[in-house]
Amino acid sequence: MAVCVAVIAKENYPLYIRSVPTENELKFHYMVHTSLDVVDEKISAMGKALVDQRELYLGLLYPTEDYKVYGYVTNSKVKFVMVVDSSNPALRDNEIRSMFRKLHNSYTDVMCNPFYNPGDRIQSRAFDSMVTSMMIQVC
Amino acid sequence: MSPTQWDFPVELCCRPMAFVTLTGLDVVYNAVHRTVWDAFCANRRADRVPISFKVLPGDHEYPKCRPKRTSYEWYIPKGILKTGWMNKHLNLVPALVVVFYELDWDEPQWKEKQSECATRVEIVRQSLQGRNTKVAVVLIQKKTPLPPGEDVIASERAAALCNACELSGKSLFVLPHTDHLVGYIIRLENAFYEHAQTYYYTEIRRVKSHKEFLNKTTHQLLFVRHQFKIAFFNELKQDTQNALKNYRTAYNLVHELRAHETNILEIKTMAGFINYKICRLCFQHNTPLDAIAQFRKHIDLCKKKIGSAELSFEHAAWMAKQFQAFGDLFDEAIKLGLTAIQTQNPGFYYQQAAHYAQERKQLAKTLCEHEASVAYPSPDPLETQTGALDFYGQRSWRQGVLSFDLSDPEKEKVGILAIQLRERNVVHSEIIITLLSNAVAQFKKYKCPRMKSHLMVQMGEEYYYAKDYTKALKLLDYVMCDYRSEGWWTLLTSILTTALKCAYLMAQLKDYITYSLELLGRASTLKDDQKSRIEKNLINVLMNESPDPEPDCDALAVKTAQKLWADRISLAGSNVFTIGVQDFVPFVQCKAKFHAPSFHVDVPVQLDVYLRADCPHPVRFSRLCVGFNNQEYNQLCVIQEASRASEVLENTTQGRMCLVPGKTRKFLFKFVAKTEDVGKKIEITSVDLVLGHETGRCVVLSWQGGGGDAASSQEALQAARSFRRWPRLPDSEVHWDSVVVQASTMIISRVPNVSVQLRHDPPALTNEMYCLAVTVRSQEKSRIRDVKLTAGLKPGQDANLTQKTQVTLRGTELCDESCPALLTDIPVGDLQPGEQLEKTLYVRCGTVGSRMFLVYVSYLINTTIEDKEIVCKCHKDETVTIETVFPFDVAVKFVSTKFEHLERVYADIPFLLMTDLLSASPWALTIASSELQLAPSMTSVDQPESQLDRVVLQTGESASECFCLRCPATGTGDGGVATGHYVVSWKRASAAPDIPVVSTVVTLPHVIVESIPLHVNADLPPFGRVRESLPVRYHLQNTTDLVQDVEISVEPSDAFMFSGLKQIRLRILPGTAQEMLYNFYPLMAGCQQLPSLHISLLRFPGFTHQLLRRFIPTSIFVKPQGRLVDDASIAAA
């Protein structure tokens, strides 16, 4: 399914980033980083909309030849970015949405941990295994 | 094959225009022809019809037309599209040939000229044998033609000329060479355009007509070819809608072709051409989404058609070209007004093109790595006889071979080898960099800063591969800060690694050191073994030795670099590098912290500098110094490696100058602040850490302010947010994150050791000289000098208070307005330890209310700190709030002589003024005197004298005085008559005798004076005695200018008998008085009612008994009749 999952802090530094081990990790880092251009643009575009009406799911950020990059932003401006192999046509928008929701829930759990300091890199095992479950189906 | 074999041919990319040739024009020698030609070709703006003109001689040979094929039955095509076909129809085979001929209608030798013209037309026709090209004749005439139908000769001769030339009337034109040449030319052009349209229409029909002869099995290629031709002719005809439709059909047909390794290149080439045409037309029709959809379809269809694995780089090259061409088309459309968006702009296509170009490079690298001994095959299989291919996309060594089997495998192998060897000569980096820089330009436009940075990194890396290290470094250095500021350490590390290689290969010392510093730092994600390698290299560099080469560098470049490094060593000179660390993340962290936010000047200022190294091995430094805003302190805060000699002895310093990874080291600095800096801020402006020695190379890491680098502010924020408790550590160690930078401190004056006491008796009374005794007592251990006192109203209060408050040192006289509200710097002298002095101040407050008073004592004292004698200025201040109140209240009332309250007084009739002074002061007051200062309108009945002299009033007591006054009749003023002033002189009972008395002036109220017509006063003894005659005389005075009729009557009383006129009526003349004499004879003792006198004035009915009773007595005390002996004594009394 997903080949790379990233959580980006409000200040745009990575809190968590993991990609399939089979491929060049750096490539995905760059891909996630460049996708922030679109995320920023989308956030600033919907900044005027009311907070409670805001859609957290940002949709397809940009397609590349081989991958599709999807984005999601929480109300506290933490961004989730997911890179999906574009050769997988079965993946619908709805499934991406539900994956993001799962990710968000798991992230919320991390935040609820009293020993976690918001803004630190995420090192939660539960979060890690959830991400693994989202990536495992492809490899 | 040229390196540009992947570029589309020019004839494909240009906009096809109808081709018309002009003959019979001598543009070199004939000025008229020249102007005609110029009018055709100069200034062809968009509003002119799309025709490309060419001047050719009349006998020009056009390409021969091949004989018409009657049947396609035995025809087998050799390829899809001939390479020359497009050019042929764009530039060689005209749609229309125009013959220009100079001939006027009234030409005398008409016959000869007509036949010459016909010959010229015939020659042209000859060379166009078999083609449908139209021919037209233009007669260049000197005279302006007459309107049609008027010139009979003209129409006759025109018909004759048409006949001779076998032309239709529509193909004969007249061009008068007159003023309106351009207008005529434009009309001619339009006519030509129509002819050209017809020509291309017939061509389309002709090609279409072939279709019925074709069959699907052998003529598959022809289907594509014909479809392409139809579309192309449509384009020439400017029918872009049909062109697009036909190109689309052609595109589908291309993909229906049976693809095989041998023809895949041809299919892809043609597919690429047709796709290009379709996209181009879509953009032209302003349907960019169609263009994008078509392109996506094209790429999806062709992506997997790699063809021969040995030549797979060709596929990558082809893909790169597809993307680049689409990017160009997209960009061009944007220039013509299309709007692109962030997620759909040409940049993505250039980026993808660059991606394929990189792939091509990779593939070429693996596929073309032949031994040096492999020679380029001879004869060159890529050479053809004509120098070009017959069909697009075919292999030169097997042109026109349609069989899928390789007839000659050897030849094939040689051909592939030749292509591979040629590919080796391609400068891939150049192609990649061009594409990347195109993409960068686009992403810059569409607000994608990160994408831009990413592409610049790729460009930098590509320059690195291309061995252009200067440019690589420049690009990488430029983008580094973007990744650093956003905290993408993995990416930063990767960039830094490349940058370090570049710096190594160019032996750029400063860059090399900077990148090493950061790669060793905490932001680097390198593994420890890498870090130790870099650290070792860095130490080598600092010891003026060459570092080891970076891994994975080009061997040849390493050799050059080693030479450069060797040169660097021998080169003396600038070996000190100062590196400002605030812009990156070095491997040493620094935090400087003053122990307190402020220091007293007599206490040494202390600060700690915390250092921490993140590198894998301990690192030594040679010097640590702190810089301040006052540079005089800089020399005091330096830690230096001890000189060589003492190093042996003091092993401890060695340990001090060493940073152990992961351990926080603290360095304490102590210095004495200058007395001039009291009240100022001392700031740390820099912390410099020197690595290496001056003898070798040294690096100065310079932190601005109290430390901190590009990453530390975020870390500090995180640390502040954290709830984590730090586990206990031994006393000497601290947690790095728990250290907070404190980069500045205030120097404040020494704590004073004197006591200031104020003695006074509040509240103050208005206007009095209020006494404030200040006692200063020295508790210092040594003599204090230059004691100065500043006292008075504290500044910053209500401005009116300043005016109404005076302070003086002299209490013996009242101070006036000239005295200030604040006395400054009163010199007091010196004080020995334990000595005290007292100073008395007098304050005069003109208004009631509360005031803040300030007493400020400053002095100098010599003290010693850290074996250094300094003169400290100390000061101590006291503030006191003093309330001011009125000392007393004065109440004034007017009463009649009978002590009855008076609303108003009567002229000339005496009345009493009573003052009542009520003390409001909490302190006893001594009234020195009181004085009545009468207004001129008032006179005193007797000599007024103060009855209050030296009276002492306690709180709440009051003192009254009474004055008998008379007010002469004056003009009746409405506001009454001024009475005068009452002046009370007083002081505190407790005040010293030399304190002046205060005079308080009370303005007495005005009184209303009224005059009455008749003055009556009685003249009677103070008392009566029973049965003794009591004579009473009433004086009646007329004060008016009128004669008064007066009725007087006396009522009898029980207590008296009386004699005199009981009832009388008389007249009193103006200004005269009448006297009435009565003799009363008291009958009873005690206070007795006198027989009452009634007076009524006929002219003044208001003159009543009531009024009268105020002036004349109504009762008298009657003594009883005493014994005779007593009589005398009573008489004496």
Image (tube, coloured by chain):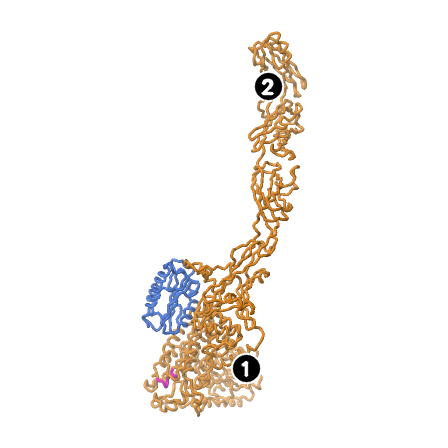
Comparing marks 2 and 1, which lies closer to the viewer?
Answer: 2
Q: Give B78 or B360, whichever is nearer the viewer.
A: B360
Q: Which chain is orange?
A: B
Within 10 angstroms of label 1, few (less than 14), some, or many (20 or more) residues? some
Does the residue at mark 2 contact the one at mark 1 (Cβ under 8 Å)? Answer: no
Secondary structure found at label 2? helix
Query: Does label 2 or label 1 sit earlier along the sequence?
Result: 1
Q: Give B214 or B435, whichever is nearer the viewer.
A: B435
Instruction: Identify the magenta region.
Output: B260-267
Q: Give B433 or B736, whichever is nearer the viewer.
A: B736
Q: Which residue is mark 2?
A: B1108
Tell me the quarter of the picture where residue B909 sits. top right
Membership of B1030 in magenta stretch: no
Question: Which amino acid is tagged 1?
Answer: Val
Q: Which residue is mark 1?
A: B36
Split into 4 quadrants, where in the image is the C terminus of chain B? top right
Farthest-out residue, front: B649
Res. B378 mark: none
Residue B460, percent across and down? 48, 75
Judging from the image, mark 2 belongs to the subunit labelled B
Question: Which amino acid is tagged 2?
Answer: Leu
Q: How many marks?
A: 2
Q: Is residue B724 above or below residue B398?
A: above
Residue B695, percent across and down? 56, 72
Judging from the image, mark 1 belongs to the subunit labelled B
Q: Colour of chain A?
A: blue
Residue B145, percent across and down? 54, 80
Within 10 angstroms of label 2, few (less than 14), some, or many (20 or more) residues? some
Whether residue B280 is visible, yes or no, is no
B411 vs B1042, left or right, is left
Q: Is residue B21 above or below residue B761?
A: below
